[in-house]
Image (cartoon, grey):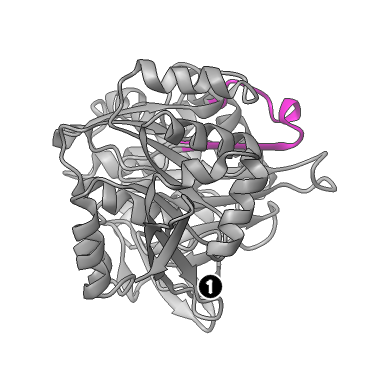
């Protein structure tokens, strides 16, 4: 869908920006433009035709920089509607690569996840309240090709070299998103994508109470435990709010603490502009994954107060994390497990002999969950560690 094929709405339930609006028709979220787009559309179409899109993409790491440097310079030459240059530039950029519907859906702050089920199928979304809807938006094969090329340029590697799957973070003027794209040979030939909004920005423990993610007693318990600076494991099923909770906890720690954050795709909120002493690395960019001793030396030589593991998935990840604990470094990590028993089983299988000694260093375990029918995410359980006489550790449910 290009600029001219997206409907103009005379009436709407929600106005997202000056030009973008939303209404509901049955079970469909119906997106379109406000009538004010008619005044700006000649300028948008002129820009869309002349933008050097892919030449610019190869030089800049984020879409936000492309919008600022490439498009805004061109907008200065146009005599468009007053005070709308930034939004006109965004629309022109996304229209120039056939991804204007995706921009519209990403601009709506209530869309938590966006699902592309092939180029000619209607795009579906999951809202912040957990409800799922189809939309009137689709991007076609042209848009899917553009999306694939953008991701390949960001990661500097072709999707074919990655076995048909590629993922990357992109920044827009307003938000950051993680995009995962799957195509042949991983699929039968169609291309699918999941775009997930980073939820860390603005979350605090108090804000999570207001949103119903946790109750006041849970908040107080976590804040009391943080005064001891414990190592923390946050566990739960996918999309249950683990990283959201991690971001809120990071804000509770003093800004002077040096925190080394390891994550393959950036999901933690960047708190450096607010005075926090955080540094960011890609786990796979440090060492070959099987060399856990080198990984631990990397951690030690950068003198962290905490090492944060954005997502512990493989046995190698488990080995790196527990080895760091054994070296006396505090950690925080998110990991997939459904209960304490399965967590202990995963850590034991992943590390082998000696894992119990590392577990003694973990002081707080938080379990998140997601209600499948409603999509509600919440903090289900809190466990505090206590040492047994035999030298083992157990966790007491709070």
Residue 256, percent from left and from top:
15, 32
Instruction: Specify few, some or many for label 1: CA neighbours under 10 Å numbering under 14, 14-19, or 20 or more.
Output: many
Question: Residue 259, can we see it?
Answer: yes
Q: Quadrant of the C terminus?
A: bottom left
Q: Nearer the viewer, residue 358 or 213?
A: 358
Q: Nearer the viewer, residue 330 or 367?
A: 330
Question: Residue 99, can we see it?
Answer: no
Q: Which residues are magenta?
A: 155-169
Q: Residue at x 31, y 71 (%)?
A: 214
Residue 173, percent from left and from top:
31, 40
Residue 263, percent from left and from top:
47, 35
Tag 1, which secondary structure? strand
Residue 32, percent from left and from top:
43, 63
Q: Tell me, yes or no, whether the highlighted magenta stretch contains residue 161.
A: yes
Whether 14 is drawn above or below 188: the answer is below
Q: Residue at x 63, y 63 (%)?
A: 122
Residue receiving disc 1: 132
Q: Residue at x 74, y 42 (%)?
A: 183
Identity of the residue furthest to the front in this view = 389
Whether 302 is drawn above or below 148: the answer is above
Q: Nearer the viewer, residue 241 or 109?
A: 241
Q: What is the total number of numbered labels drawn onto the structure image? A: 1
Q: Nearer the viewer, residue 394 or 128?
A: 394
Whether 10 is drawn above or below 257: the answer is below
Q: Tell me, yes or no, whether the highlighted magenta stretch contains residue 367.
A: no
């Amino acid at each position: 869908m290009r600029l001219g094929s997206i409907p103009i709405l005379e009436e709407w339930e929600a106005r997202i920006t000056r030009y973008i609006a939303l209404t509901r028709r049955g079970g469909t979220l119906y997106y379109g433009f406000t009538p004010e787009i008619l005044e700006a559309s000649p300028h948008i179409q002129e820009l869309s035709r002349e933008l050097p899109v892919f030449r610019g993409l190869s030089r800049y790491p984020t879409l936000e920089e492309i919008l600022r440097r490439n498009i805004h310079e061109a907008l200065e030459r146009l005599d468009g509607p007053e005070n709308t240059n930034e939004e006109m530039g965004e629309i022109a950029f996304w229209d120039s690569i056939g991804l204007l519907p995706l921009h519209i859906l990403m601009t709506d702050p209530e869309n938590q996840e966006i699902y592309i089920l092939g180029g000619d199928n209607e795009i579906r979304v999951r809202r912040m309240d957990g409800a799922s809807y189809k939309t009137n938006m689709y991007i076609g094969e042209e848009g899917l090709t553009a999306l694939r090329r953008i991701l390949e340029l960001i990661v500097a590697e072709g999707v074919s070299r990655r076995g048909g799957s590629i993922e990357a973070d992109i920044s827009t003027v307003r938000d950051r998103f993680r995009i995962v794209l799957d195509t042949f040979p991983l699929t039968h030939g169609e291309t699918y994508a999941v775009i997930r909004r980073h939820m860390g920005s603005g979350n605090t423990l108090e804000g999570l109470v207001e949103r119903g993610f946790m109750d006041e007693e849970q908040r107080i318990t976590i804040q009391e435990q943080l005064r001891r600076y414990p190592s923390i494991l946050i566990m739960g099923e996918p999309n249950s709010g683990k990283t959201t909770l991690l971001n809120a906890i990071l804000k509770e720690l003093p800004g002077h603490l040096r925190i080394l954050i390891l994550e393959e795709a950036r999901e933690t909120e960047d708190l450096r502009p607010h005075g926090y002493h955080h540094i960011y690395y890609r786990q796979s960019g440090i060492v070959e994954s099987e060399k856990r001793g080198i990984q631990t030396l990397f951690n030690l030589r950068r003198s962290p107060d905490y090492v944060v593991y954005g997502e512990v998935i493989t046995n190698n990840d488990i080995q790196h994390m527990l080895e760091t604990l054994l070296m006396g470094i505090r950690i925080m990590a998110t990991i997939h497990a459904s209960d304490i028993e399965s967590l202990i089983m995963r850590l034991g299988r992943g590390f082998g002999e000696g894992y119990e000694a590392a577990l003694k260093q973990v002081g707080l375990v938080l379990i998140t969950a997601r209600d499948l029918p409603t999509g509600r995410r919440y903090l289900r359980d809190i466990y505090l560690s206590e040492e047994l006489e035999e030298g083992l550790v157990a966790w007491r449910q709070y």
